[in-house]
Amino acid sequence: MFAEIDWNVDTLGVVMGCGIPIVAIVATFWYKIAKTTSENELKRTLAERGMSAEEIERVVAAKPSKGKRSQDRCEC
């Protein structure tokens, strides 16, 4: 099937024009699934440690500070 296609610049342009957005959409959903899975694993771990729902909510809602990068805080 692919051997029969005339692979010229126009054909490659159409394939790449359709392929790049599809890859971007798949990557976005893959990232969201991985993020949700990671957050669920964190919540499960915190619950197993005996933390209350309020403490778990506070940990999950916490964001890293924008003032310093993680490399600046490393005491290697």
Image: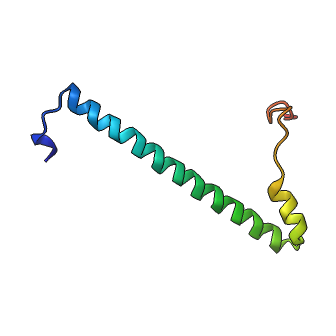
x, y (%) of residue 17?
34, 35
Asked whether 14 or 44 is in front, the reply is 14
x, y (%) of residue 60?
80, 58
Q: Residue at x 40, y 38 (%)?
A: 20
Count of residue discs? 0
Describe the colour scheme in one phrase.
rainbow
Indicate the quadrant containing the C terminus: top left, top right, bottom left or bottom right.
top right
Q: Residue at x 47, y 43 (%)?
A: 24
Quadrant in the picture for residue 49: bottom right
Asked whether 44 or 6 is in front, the reply is 6
Q: Residue at x 13, y 48 (%)?
A: 1
Residue situated furthest top in the rendering:
9
8 relative position to 59: left or right: left
- Is 61 drawn above or below residue 67 in the view shown? below
Q: Residue at x 80, y 33 (%)?
A: 69
16 relative position to 38: left or right: left
71 relative position to 6: left or right: right
- Is 43 drawn above or below residue 14 in the view shown? below
- Is 36 drawn above or below residue 24 in the view shown? below
x, y (%) of residue 41?
70, 65
58 relative position to 45: left or right: right
Asked whether 48 or 20 is in front, the reply is 20
x, y (%) of residue 71?
79, 32
